[in-house]
Structure formats: C-alpha cells, structure tokens
Image: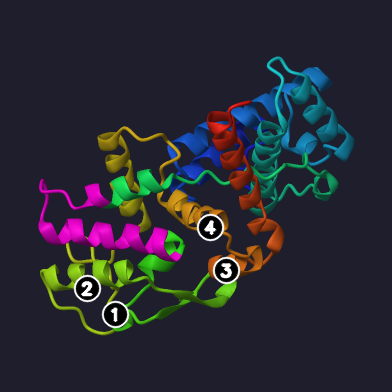
Amino acid sequence: MNGAPTTGVAALDLWTEHLRHERRASGRTIQSYQAGVRIYLGFLQQHDGEPPTLARLATVSAGDLRAFLAWRRAGPPPLGPRSLAQALSAVRSFHRFLDLRLETPNPALGVVRGPRLKPGAPRPVSEAQAREMIAEAVDTRGPTWRGLRDRAVLTLLWGCGLRISEALALRRCDAPLGETLRITGKGGKTRLVPVLEAVREAVELYLAAAPAALSPDDPLFRADRGGPLRPRQVQAMVQTLRARLQLPDRATPHALRHAFATHLLGAGADLRAIQDLLGHASLSTTSRYTAVDAERLMRAYASAHPRA
C-alpha cells in the first residue's frame, strides 16, 4: 500500500483516528484503548530490543500474546481479570484494524482466550429510591408535560421491567395501554408483560399534557424539540435526578429494571416467571438476582436478629 505506515506507532496513530472519526468512540474509550496498545507495543519493543514494525506485528504469536497478558497480570500494577480482559480487547481491536485497513493479518491471535469473568450481581435501587426518582421526575422547574413524560418512562422501567430501548420503541398506537404489553426485546424475541394501573395512569397523564398530537406510528415518547426521545437523554435525566436526590451511582435507568426483578423475587415470584417477564434467553442470567435477594435478606438478618 502506498503511503502505508511501516511502524506499530504510526499504525497506532491511524487506528486512533479511525476510532475517533469513523467509530465515533467516546474520548474515554479512545484514551483507554490507546494507552493499552501503547503498553502492548512497549512490551514487544522490550521483548525484541527494537520498536515493532508492521511486519513484526504480523508475526506476533499466540505465545507472545499470552506472555504479554501474563506480564500485565503480574504488574506493576497487577491487573485483575476484568482489567486484563479490557487490555486484550484493545489489542484485538488494534489487530483487526491492521488486518482490515493495513493488510496485516495475524490469525494466530484468534486462539488466545481472555480470562473468565464472573458476572457481577445486578445493582438494583431500593423501593424507596425508585419511588423518590419517579416522584422527583415531575419537576416544577421545567414544562409540566416533560416531567410527566419522564415519570411515565421511569414508571415503565420499574413497573414493567423494560429496558430503555424497549420503552422508547413504543408507538402512539400502543397507548392507551391494556392489561398486557407486547414487547420486542433483544434478538427480536417477543414477550408479554403485565401492565400495572400506575403505569397506565402515568402514560395517560403524559399524553394528555403533551404539547402536540402524535400520529399512530410516531414514537410514544418525544424529546423537547419534537424528535423521538433518545436513551442518552433518559440517562442524562436520571443523572440529574440522582444528583438532586443524592442517590448512589448505581441509581441508573437499568437499575429500575433490576429493581423490578428483585422486588418480584423478594415477594416470592418464581424465577422462571421472572425470566419470561424480563425476556432473558437463559435462566442463568435471571438467577443472578437470587444473589441480590440473598444479600438483602442477610442484611435484614444482621440488623434485626437479636443474636446477630
């Protein structure tokens, strides 16, 4: 390729520009990935005694990459499994770029597996925190219809266990809500979720106050300027509520969906039924909520039992 870089450092600069302008990656992601690959290139330079060229990057073996991961695991600073997996992800992304854009494939690296990561337990908000967020959403500092919209969205997340994308995919023709709501989730999988009266009421109050009429195929939730409400806008709204109410960082939109599951489990709901309501493909994903509920029970025991 004419004008193609010949060194790993030059290729890193091109890859960084690719992440910034083509992938539209966030600044934090770019910084993390760039730092990870700089360390990788530095390891190869230390290993070989000279800066790595593109030709050298094409011959990095699975053993070389495993040696790099072992070196990163030992530190300093030593890396845990999750940080090590992130380091490997950065290196793989870099090599994919070398393959697709700089004609420098390296199929040997595909056999290297990252560390096994134990899924973290979901981090739900408490019932009191969920109620505070929903009540505070109707804020007199903004237009009434916007507060009612925000309250309706949060009520759907908590009351029906929806993902943000699922709530924002609803159309005007879906309202007024019935006894159940058909949701299309990940992988095109559909499920029926029951709709509480409080959820129906929140959506109806929002629609009654909305400044403009919506056609049946319009998104149910509209942004301030008339376009469809976006997930980032919901996340920003919750971040504002979190700061206003001084809630912990775990108080996110998705934490309301987690709360839906843990509150049902705590009330005695069957795990398989919760799996169906959440649209999980695997029961093992849903079973993570049992750990959350067990933690809650142990805290209650420790605080209430006279011999604790």
Q: Position of residue 115 (x, y in %)?
A: 78, 39
Left or right placement of residue 107 versus residue 187 in this view:
right
Labels 2 and 3: the sequence-earlier one: 2
Binning the other alpha carbons within 10 Å of mark 3 as few (below 14), some (14 to 19) or many (20 upward) gives: many
Q: Which residue is mark 4?
A: 267
Tell me the quarter of the image containing the C terminus. top right
Binning the other alpha carbons within 10 Å of mark 1 as few (below 14), some (14 to 19) or many (20 upward) gives: some
Q: Position of residue 68 (x, y in %)?
A: 79, 28
| Mark 4–mark 2 CB contact (< 8 Å) | no
Left or right placement of residue 249 versus residue 116 in this view:
left
Which residue is the extreme one toward the right?
63
Name the disc covering residue 175, or none.
Answer: 1
Residue 81: which quarter of the image? top right
Q: Secondary structure at mark 4?
A: loop
- Front disc: 4 or 3: 4
Q: Amino acid at mark 1?
A: Ala
Q: Position of residue 156 (x, y in %)?
A: 37, 64
Labels 4 and 1: the sequence-earlier one: 1
Q: Is residue 214 magenta?
A: no
Q: Which residue is mark 2?
A: 204
Binning the other alpha carbons within 10 Å of mark 4 as few (below 14), some (14 to 19) or many (20 upward) gives: few
Q: Amino acid at mark 2?
A: Glu
